[in-house]
Amino acid sequence: MKDIFFIRLLVLLFVCYATTQQAVSSSSVVNKLTIQDTVYSVTFKNQLPPSGDKHDYYSLAPYWWPDSTKENGLPYLRRDGQRNPEAKEISDKKMLEKMATEVISLAKEYRITTNKKSLNRANQLLRAWFLDSATRMNPNLNYAQAIKGRDVGRGFGLIETRVFIPLLGAVDVLRRDTLFEQQTYPELKQWFTEYLEWMEKSENGKNERAAKNNHGTWYTAQYAYIAVFVGRKEAAVKELNTLKNRIAWQIEPDGTQPLELERTKSLSYSIFNLEAYIKAFTLADSLGLNLWNYQTLDGRSLQKAIEYVIPFIKEPSKWPYTQIIPINKKDTEKALTMCDYFFTKIHEKNY
């Protein structure tokens, strides 16, 4: 009887052990799935950048395609305005946009409700993207908008972090919480300090700053917002003042933007460039630098550029230049709101 009892006991213990191990194994799988289902990270991509470091942001230039005349398709060729679906296979850009969008939404909720749940969720997302050692993004864009067979990364890739502008505004809202202000904010400030230094010193950063078209305008806007965030207001003001030079070489006296008109989506890019100006001018205003009414001696100004595009935003079909895809209603409404905001700032009647 004792032998039977001990045998039954051993069987029971074995079953309990096996069940426990299965539960542990299942828990591990759930944990692995959970982290990717609940936060966003550059480390989740399925392709590594040339550095081999999954923490480096990586993306492909959207308008570059395999050369059909070459067996390996290299080097890629440009088709302006035509998005290569291959670029979507690398998830970093999409992940960044999703993270920023959610944090901005959560910050709006927190500002209205002071709900700790919104704050904690936003904090979780920010820490996963920027700070936690397992998932953080390195503070550089060395491998953004790469072109296969040509470039491992380009200055043009900086356009993809323009979401940092509203994101930093969200962080400022979250700083109302004492714990966030004491713990997460200083670490974020350090990350963006390093990123700003990369913008200043890297070849990609220098190339983007030198860009004559919308890329250069967005560089200035990003740089200034980040500089203010990390406490370098003088650097921000200095950079914002360069917008006067940009107006001189980007906008004609009649309001057209020749470098944007060269594009196959010329109306979209004309509006896109103006959006960067308005974001930058808004920040300049808060720093005591009034650029809203600035114009060159020969009459080039942001106002002229906005007045030129307004009729075509309302009736895109009358746009006299190349626009290979239609502008949707949501983009039209956004553009008109932007223009309305501009005229409010220069104290004129809305158009």
Image (tube, rainbow, N blue to C red):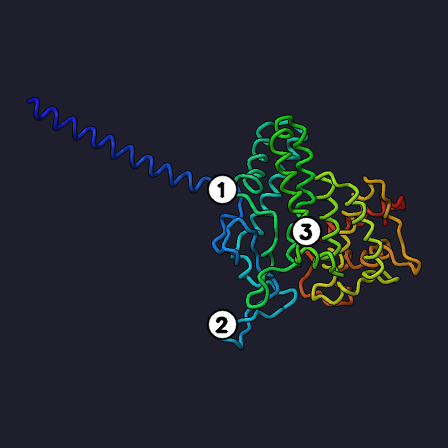
The residue under label 2 is 72
Q: Amino acid at mark 1?
A: Ala
Q: Nearer the viewer, residue 330 or 116?
A: 116
Inter-mark Cα distance, 3 to 1 = 24 Å
Residue 339: x %, y % from top left: 80, 50
Q: Residues within 10 Å of mark 2 (few under 14, many from 20)?
A: few
Question: Mark 3 or mark 2, which is nearer to you?
Answer: 3
For residue 344, side relative to residue 206 (left or right): right
- Kindly identify the residue that appears in the image at 77 percent across and 56 percent down: 313
Inter-mark Cα distance, 3 to 2 = 33 Å
The residue under label 1 is 134
Q: Nearer the viewer, residue 249 or 242?
A: 242
18 w.r.t. 210: above or below = above
Residue 75: x %, y % from top left: 56, 71
197 w.r.t. 177: above or below = below
For residue 344, side relative to residue 38 (left or right): right
The residue under label 3 is 199
Residue 184: x %, y % from top left: 61, 33
Helix, strand or loop status at disc 1: loop
Q: Amino acid at mark 3?
A: Met
Inter-mark Cα distance, 2 to 1 = 35 Å
Q: Amino acid at mark 2?
A: Asn
Q: Indicate the quadrant where residue 114 lies.
A: top right
